[in-house]
Amino acid sequence: MRLLTVLVFLLAILSGCQPSSDVQRYNVRGSVTYEGKPVPTGTIMMTPANGNKGPGGYAEIRDGRFDTATTGQGPTGGPHHVVIQGYDGKSNPANELPMGKALFDPYETDVNLPTSDTTNDFDIPASAIRQPSTGGSRGKA
């Protein structure tokens, strides 16, 4: 439930303050792998960075693939900070784990997206492995 609340909050932020008719959004699709295997489920969030004023983007990861067209939340072009969360897909509603257990700590990287629909693939490095509750490490490309 906590994850759902965070996602709703982030979607509100990512939707931006500018009217959608004034901003060109682009579709971003691609794959997300971890240890050479597709990430079963998760989220990918793209937040404008380095002076980029456009709205960000958001998509769910399903069977190692994501597509912002499914959420209608494609980002603008330009620099973006990307945060990827990956889960094993073995949900456990009793423990409030709708996507399952985290495979790795949230992975962060920066990309420069074109001003067109594009494909971006992400390979999460082994160094992003989920650490014990001491806070863990964060990947940074």
Image (cartoon, grey):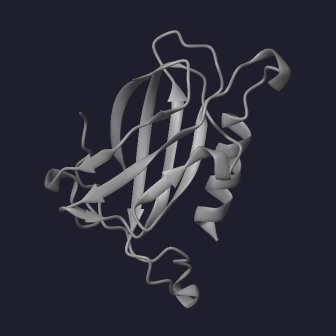
Q: Position of residue 14 (x, y in %)?
A: 66, 35
- Dividing the image into 4 quarters, which one contains the C terminus? top left
Query: Seen from this angle, which residue lies furthest top?
Result: 51
Quarter holding the N terminus is bottom right
Q: In this view, does 116 lie to the left or right of 124?
A: right
90 horizontally vs 14: left or right: left
The spot of residue 109 in percent (x, y) is 33, 34
Which residue occupies the foreground of this view, 36 or 93?
Answer: 36
Instruction: Name the residue located 73 percent from the left edge and 28 percent from the top edge.
Output: 16
- The x, y position of residue 117, in whole percent, is 55, 30
x 69%, y 47%: residue: 9
Please say if 138 is above or below 37: above
Q: Quadrant of residue 120?
A: top left
Q: In this view, does 47 lie above or below 100?
A: above
Q: Can residue 23 be seen in this view?
A: yes
Residue 85 located left or right of residue 20:
left
User: Residue 94 at what x, y percent from top left?
Assistant: 57, 90
The answer, for residue 105, to whether it is visible in the render is: no
